[in-house]
Amino acid sequence: MLLIGSHVSFTNKDQLVGSVEEAHSYGSTTFMFYTGAPQNTNRSKIDTEKTKEAFELMNKYGIDPSKVIVHAPYIINLANNKEPDKYEFSKRFLKEELSRCHLLNMHYLVLHPGSHVGLGEDIAIENIISALNEILKNSYDVTVLLETMAGKGTEVGKTIDEIKKIIEGVEYKEKIGICLDTCHLNDAGYEISNFSSILDEIDSKIGLNFVKCIHINDSKNPLSSHKDRHENIGFGTIGFDNLINVIYDSRLENIPKILETPYLGSNAPYKEEIEMIKDKKFNSHVFDKIIEK
């Protein structure tokens, strides 16, 4: 079964139940959510009854909970320890997010490695490794997935070699993995049209067994732009056919593929994009009815 879905909401009121219902409305077979707003620390208490109800819904809709993805908030930065208070905050908040994943019985948490903000990549990587070795010393069955980044500003994790260095330094190998992002890879300089070679490099340097999630995004920018601006599927510089080749690559068959493409006004594009992906056929007019609303 194709594991395709999108980012969905997680509200204080409906929590995981609302996430599942939204994903199902798009025709998804998996999904990704934040346990609260990605830009701040506001978090509601996990409702165990809502979680139980959500798991019953996932069973009803044929969604495997073990393939559902959580994304850590953007405010976490493990790369920069220039200000100790902020570094400790990032570690503490990531620990709390892992605890929330555990309460929700979710097994994968995507994390942006962070930005060095002038410290340099080597020191940043040491900071990330140190923090992860402290944070992953827990009893939770939750794997942190390092997301490949576009290289905007001073982002760390823009190359396979940087991701490799971090994973090599992490003591708890069973709790660390990779989330590939097609827009980020393109903007960092990796040609998605030659995606097989990207997988070959990851396999030889790290191991494909570490890849646990793929973010499927087209890009508004040309190769090596280092800008990180997502575009709707087939409307960007990567192109529909190249993204289809990623989605249906046999080596990634059991890996969740998650759309993070832009809304059209206030309307989500995911139902239409998922239909195109399932049909393997691009429709340049797919969003016409949404735009007319």
Image (tube, rainbow, N blue to C red):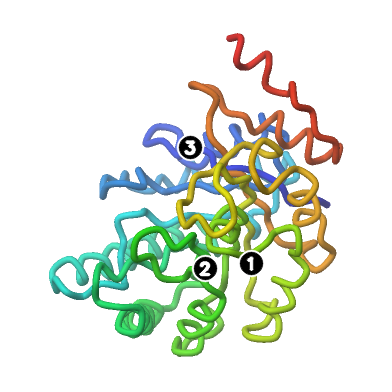
Q: Give the foreground label among 3 and 2.
A: 2
Q: Give the foreground label among 1 and 3.
A: 1
- Give me the disc on residue 9: 3
Q: Give left or right: position of 293 versus 193.
A: left
Cα–Cα gap, marks 2 and 1: 7 Å
The reply to whether dot 3 and dot 2 touch (C-beta < 8 Å) is no
Mark 2 belongs to which amino acid? Leu
As helix, strand or loop, the secondary structure at mark 3 comes to loop
- From the top left corner, tell me how far across and down residue 53 is, in percent: 56, 41
As helix, strand or loop, the secondary structure at mark 1 comes to strand
The reply to whether dot 2 and dot 1 touch (C-beta < 8 Å) is yes
Cα–Cα gap, marks 1 and 3: 21 Å
Q: Residue at x 79, y 34 (%)?
A: 276
Residue corresponding to mark 1: 212
Mark 3 belongs to which amino acid? Ser
Cα–Cα gap, marks 3 and 2: 20 Å
Task: Compare marks 2 and 1 and give the one earlier in the sequence.
Answer: 2
- Give me the disc on residue 145: 2
- From the top left corner, tell me how far across and down residue 4 is, in percent: 71, 47
Q: Nearer the viewer, residue 221 or 24?
A: 221
Question: Can you say whether 48 is above or below 72 in the image?
Answer: above
- From the top left corner, tell me how far across and down residue 72 is, in percent: 41, 57
